[in-house]
Image (tube, helix red, strand yellow):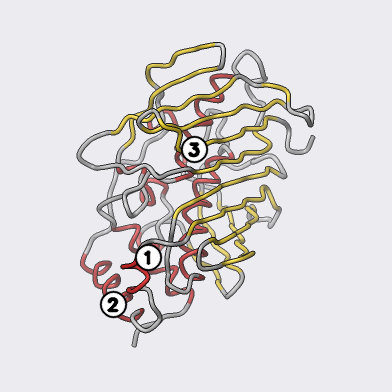
Amino acid sequence: MLNLSLKARAELMFRFAARSKWGKLQSLLGINLKEDGGNTEIVSIDDDCSVVSTRIAPWICLPDGRPCITSAITLFDQISTFAGAVPWDHRMRGGQSLTLQADVYKPLDLNPGDEVIFVNHKKRHGKVVSFIEAEMMNTKRETLAYLRHIRYQPMGYEWEVLGHPVLRPMLFFALESHNYAMPVTSCSIPEYWDEVFCPVNVSQSEQGLHAHFEVNDMLANPLGNLQGGVRCMMQVQLAKQAVQGILSDRLPIKHFHASFLSGVKVSSKEKRIVGVHSSFASRSLAGYRQSEATFSRDNKPVVLSTVVWGDPEG
């Protein structure tokens, strides 16, 4: 008999993502389930809360050895979707991100390989929009950051039908059959952030810096879309260059907010060029320095983000 529990639904989606031929990001991040050779464990999940532990991949850390807050957002994007939005949804829909946000509560004093725990809370989950909030903790159960994920749930008529509770056992059987038949995606794990996010054609204007990035299915979710957290990481990569010489090199990010206007489809057959713009740091109303970043596809903005720089304990 099929196990249709919330935890089984979450594990099903993690296993599917580990074997997807359209997007390999989960394997690149090293957050496959332990049974698939990764470092992730779904500790618990109920109707309102899920607890997931994983480890920090070395390549998502900055040169100082600590992860950027957008690295945490990338992990949270994947985890809050597969251990939150999907199992909590009445049709098991993943949808797409509308916003991702993080507020750093304590310095991210984490090293490559360190365990982190995401405690995800379902604040509201409807037919159209879901709201998930989370704390990212270290192994001492100290909260390092607060995160928020708002998702647009609809995925089309086909998924509405397949995900119906009456047909859910058939959907489960089909996905499980795929998971048993397909091997876990293998990929070459990079050592450094710059190996994955390397801006080219960087130019400067009075408004800030503009650059291009090459992207492919290595950075995509299981359905072949460039993951939201990855887009945030690219924006911060350029934003850090834009504030060099203006702010301290070690000045961390206190707050990050991204609004998603559209998806970005990528392919294994060819690399796609996307554009990123970052303003220079200006003074916010609260007295902090902040940057505005735009992620573009075909010269059309698809992500608008705000980066607030400052000591999280300041």
The residue that appears at 37% across and 65% down in the rendered structure is 35
Q: Are marks 1 and 3 in contact (CB under 8 Å)?
A: no
Pinpoint residue 135: horizontal percent, then vertical percent: 65, 55
Check the image and report above or below for 245 versus 123: above
Instruction: Give the quarter of the image for residue 16.
Output: bottom left
Q: Which residue is mark 3?
A: 303
Q: Which residue is mark 2?
A: 173
The residue that appears at 41% across and 27% down in the rendered structure is 275
Q: Quadrant of the N terminus?
A: bottom left
Disc number for residue 46: none
Q: Are marks 3 and 2 in contact (CB under 8 Å)?
A: no
Callout 2 secondary element: helix
Which residue is more in the foreground, 83 or 156?
156
Callout 3 secondary element: strand
Chain-order first, disc 1 or disc 3: 1
Q: Are marks 1 and 2 in contact (CB under 8 Å)?
A: no
Which residue is more in the foreground, 222 or 167?
167
Check the image and report above or below for 60 versus 134: above
Q: What type is the residue that disc 2 sits on?
A: Phe
For label 3, count other residues whose C-alpha is less than 10 Å away and answer few (under 14), some (14-19) or many (20+): many
Q: Quadrant of the C terminus?
A: top right
Left or right, residue 194 beside residue 80: left
Q: Name the mark nearer the viewer: 1 or 3.
A: 3
Q: Name the mark nearer the viewer: 1 or 2.
A: 2
Pinpoint residue 14: horizontal percent, then vertical percent: 39, 62
